[in-house]
Amino acid sequence: MMRSEFVIEGVKKFSIEQIAESGQAFRWEKDQNGGYTGVAFGKVINVIQEKDKVIIKGANKEDHQKIWKNYFDMDRDYGQLIKGLKGKDIHLDSAILFGEGIRILNQDLWEMIISFIISGNNNIPRIKKSIDIICEKYGDFIDEIDGKKYYSFPSPSQLSIATVDDLRKCGVGYRDAYIHKTTKVILEKQVDLDLIQNMNLEDARKELKKLTGVGDKVADCILLFSCKKTTAFPVDTWVKKILTTYYGLKKTSVKEVNKFAIEYFGEDCGIAQQYLFYYIRNQNL
């Protein structure tokens, strides 16, 4: 059966490779044709890029307007954003030049919570494998493409049937109890995801940290990658190295980092962080 496709012409500051490999999403895989296949919001698509032309296979115009336009942050002018960030220092300029095709994905909040709980003290191949197993066991079947079956990310009610032991068998390690407890808390609306979307950054972070397995870094990843909170500035070992080595920060507490990030990089500091993170991780500086 022929799959539908939607073509976007003249797309600037967009690289599906950089987006998929920037550590913000775990359900994208590179294909033999050089494109990437990804799963989000119960859909599976293949994205092929030819310079400034983006071809989304498995989508039509309606899907693009309802899902993918927002998912790929198409309404944000990244050219203008980059102009505002350039010239601050040589390190950020180098990072932007290296990864100027990165865009911040607007992903499902619930999926990001579980995905980034799994990500704690973990590596990307293992994170991806665990998420794939969870989706296959508890999500809905979406489609089979080239012999591979794709499944949606399970809803809280779907995942709630998994015991701690069941989750351990998905390869999540000690995070099994975190996921089990968080699922129950979300399902019972002890933490309301709808409210988090509309909270300010500090309140949203506090609310997310009520969930077992969610600390400051994980909370900020969730808020940056699913709630359009570009003032969120996740700090892991890579970012801490950047801040201390290149920006002279001696204190890296959440309060100190947030203050510095907003004052120095501005309201889009979270996007600046993503350029720096992608650069230092791939250059292994």
Image (cartoon, helix red, strand yellow):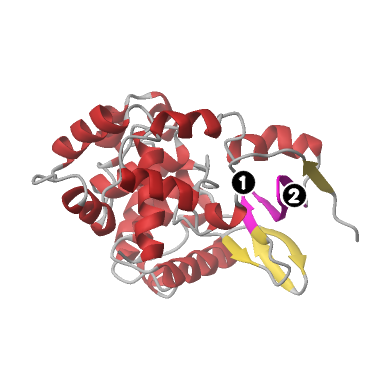
Disc 1 marks a residue whose amino acid type is Phe
Residue at the image position 56 percent from the left and 59 percent from the top: 27
Secondary structure type for disc 1: loop
Q: Which numbered circle lies on residue 64?
A: none
User: Earlier along the polypeptide chain: callout 1 or callout 2?
Assistant: 1
Q: Which numbered circle lies on residue 56?
A: 2
Instruction: Indicate the position of residue 145 as horizontal and vertical percent values.
Output: 76, 67
One can see residue 220 in this view: yes
Secondary structure type for disc 2: strand
Disc 2 marks a residue whose amino acid type is Ile
Let me know if residue 42 is in the magenta part: yes
Dot 2 surroundings within 10 Å: few (below 14), some, or many (20 or more)?
Answer: many
Left or right of 67, for residue 145: right
Foreground disc of the pair 1, 2: 2
Report the magenta stretch's main SS. Answer: strand
Q: Quadrant of the N terminus?
A: bottom right
Relative to 57, say whether 29 is above or below: below
Q: Residue 264 is drawn in which quadrant?
A: top left
Q: Nearer the viewer, residue 189 or 170?
A: 170
One can see residue 156 in this view: no
Instruction: Indicate the position of residue 71 as horizontal and vertical percent values.
Output: 59, 40
Residue at the image position 62 percent from the left and 55 percent from the top: 39
Q: Nearer the viewer, residue 184 or 236?
A: 236
Q: Residue 230 is drawn in which quadrant?
A: top left
Residue at the image position 34 percent from the left and 32 percent from the top: 231
Residue range highlighted in magenta: 38-57
> Which residue bears the numbered disc 1?
41
The residue most toward the left is 250
